[in-house]
Image (cartoon, grey):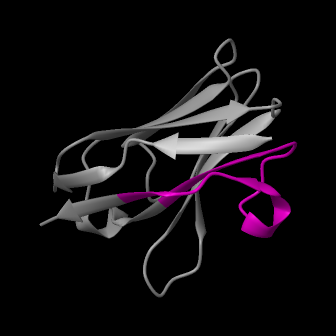
Amino acid sequence: VQLQASGGGLVQAGGSLRLSCAASGGTFYVMLWFRQAPGREREFVAAISRYGGTSYADSVKGRFTISRDNSKNTVSLQMNSLKPEDTAVYYCAGGTVITARPMSYDYWGQGTQVTVSS
């Protein structure tokens, strides 16, 4: 199974970006987004189950929205009101349970850079 992330870029604070991740070769009960800023550990951002249940990190609640299209085997992350502290490489992941622990997941996309300027 492969995951391919896209949609990162450079945006000013307060702006929006939409990330997408396409899975091929299989499906996942849970699809997630993590992020990793320079010098920091990879951290949980958001997750969505196959049936639409969602979970968010406190730092992004109310600003980010995760969604998925099961027919296309894709997951998206709509990021609004972006802040400089959202700057990171964003990774999609797939698995069977929702947990904030990156080591729980074996399947990862290649990462896409999001940079928010102040």
Q: Which of 53/42 is in front?
A: 42
Please give left or right for residue 36 compared with residue 3 in the image: left
Vertical arrangement, residue 39 with respect to residue 93, above or below: below
Whether residue 101 is visible to the viewer of this picture, yes or no, is no
Residue at position x 69%, y 17% in the image: 70
Left or right of residue 77: residue 48: right
State the residue at coordinates (25%, 41%): 16
Q: Residue at x 84, y 62 (%)?
A: 104
Most distant residue in the right direction: 96
Image coordinates of residue 92 in percent, x first then y, are 61, 49
Quadrant showing the C terminus: bottom left
Please provide percent x and percent y for residue 15. 18, 45
Name the quadrant containing residue 31: top right
Q: Give above or below for 94 relative to 86.
A: above
Check residue 109 for magenta coloring: yes
Q: Is residue 18 left or right of residue 47?
A: left
Q: Which residue, as the protein is rendered here, is positioned at the far bottom?
A: 39
Quadrant including the N terminus: top right
The stretch of residues the image draws in magenta is 90-113
